[in-house]
Image (spheres, rainbow, N blue to C red):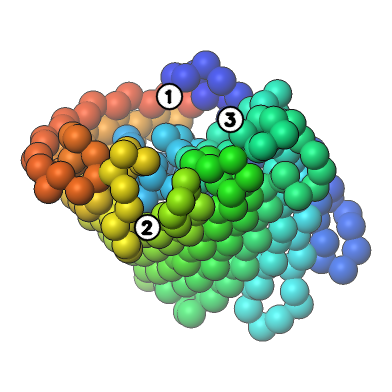
Amino acid sequence: MYFEISHLHLEEAFLTTTSLPFGLQARAGYMNAAFGRQNPRHVHTWNFVNPPLSHTRFMGEEHFSGLGAETSVLFPLPWFLTVGLQAFDTKPKAHLRTASFGTSDYTKTGKFDGPEDCVYIGRIKNFFALSHDWSLNIGLSAAIGHSPFSPDGRSEVFGSDIYLKWRPISSGRDAVAVALTLEYIGRRAQIPSDVLLDHGGYAQVDVQSSRQWMFGLRGGYTGLLEPVDGSVLELDDQQWRTGFSVTHMPTHFSRVRMQYDLGNFTPSGVGTGNNEIYHAVFFQVEVGIGKHAAHSF
């Protein structure tokens, strides 16, 4: 069970099986969607104050999450291959949080009619230990459910992600690390009298120079693949943002972070061409209390 004090809400609370045969595992409860690299990670493991642009546009302001169940299997191969499937309840009381899917009260009947009204997420994750110092994680994700823009319309989201990390453990310098994250997301959603096709992604480099200091550089982009009527949706046609962060870790349970962002946005919605440049500075203090389970790679 994970709590986040800053927004005073429950992040995740679920039950997990520990001894199913054939490499199977099951979870049930309120959980983050296993989509992409960024979304499953808890806020306190982010190396930036805010999520990437593509995450906000397709997942949500914080996480794509909900009440549901998951089953996954780890295949006995020379590398680690995990395949998982999740199903989320879309009834309003289930508190589904997402930017790409609608709840059951937005169907034509205005109620939950059956399994076809759930949101389904599939993920394939591959982990390769390239050497003692290099490791690679490659993932593919897909999700399908109701469109949030059109009653009884459908929405599909697809994503791919790569995480490459170098940590010179073989030389005894385990406090130093460099990691590269690449993630791309595309969406097809039905809207009134049209189809929305948009996409986005980001590249992020994280450098840990010691046990106390970490630096991050990130660039992201989102935009439409085809133009749509600006009166239907309030989505930026093209948006980009770059950011730089410096994090000091006085202890294992505390972080102090400074971040600078430079980006653009379209105040009046799609198709105006009136992009504006903005600057943003963030200061964050983070303190953890109590034991915490190990984070996934």
Residue 37 position, x and y percent, is 48, 56
The secondary element bearing badge 2 is classed as strand
Of residues 171 and 22, the one nearer the viewer is: 22
Q: Which residue is mark 1?
A: 287
**Residue plotted at (44% across, 54% down):** 194
Q: Is residue 288 above or below residue 139?
A: above
Q: Is label 2 in contact with label 3 (beta carbons under 8 Å)?
A: no
| Gap in angstroms between the C-alphas marked 2 and 3 | 28 Å
Give the foreground label among 2 and 3.
2
Please state which of the two labelled residues, at mark 2 or mark 1, is closer to the viewer. 2
Q: Which tag, 1 or 3, sits closer to the chain's start?
A: 3
Q: Residue at x 58, y 30 (%)?
A: 11
Q: Is residue 103 above or below residue 127?
A: above
> Residue 235 falls in which quadrant of the image?
top left
Q: Earlier in the sequence, mark 2 or mark 1?
A: 2
Q: Quadrant of the N terminus?
A: top right
Confirm whether residue 207 shows in the render: no
- Where residue 84 sits: x, y (%)? 70, 61
Q: Earlier in the sequence, mark 2 or mark 3?
A: 3
Q: Is residue 188 visible?
A: yes
Query: Callout 1: helix, strand or loop?
Result: strand
Indicate which label's residue lies in the foreground, 1 or 3: 3
Circle number at residue 11: 3
Q: Could you tell me the amino acid type at mark 1?
A: Val
Counting the numbered discs, the total is 3
Residue corresponding to mark 2: 198
Q: Quadrant of residue 179?
A: bottom left
Three-letter code for the amino acid on which mark 2 is drawn = Asp
Q: Amino acid at mark 3?
A: Glu
> For the residues marked 2 and 1, what is the alpha-carbon distance in whole angstroms?
37 Å
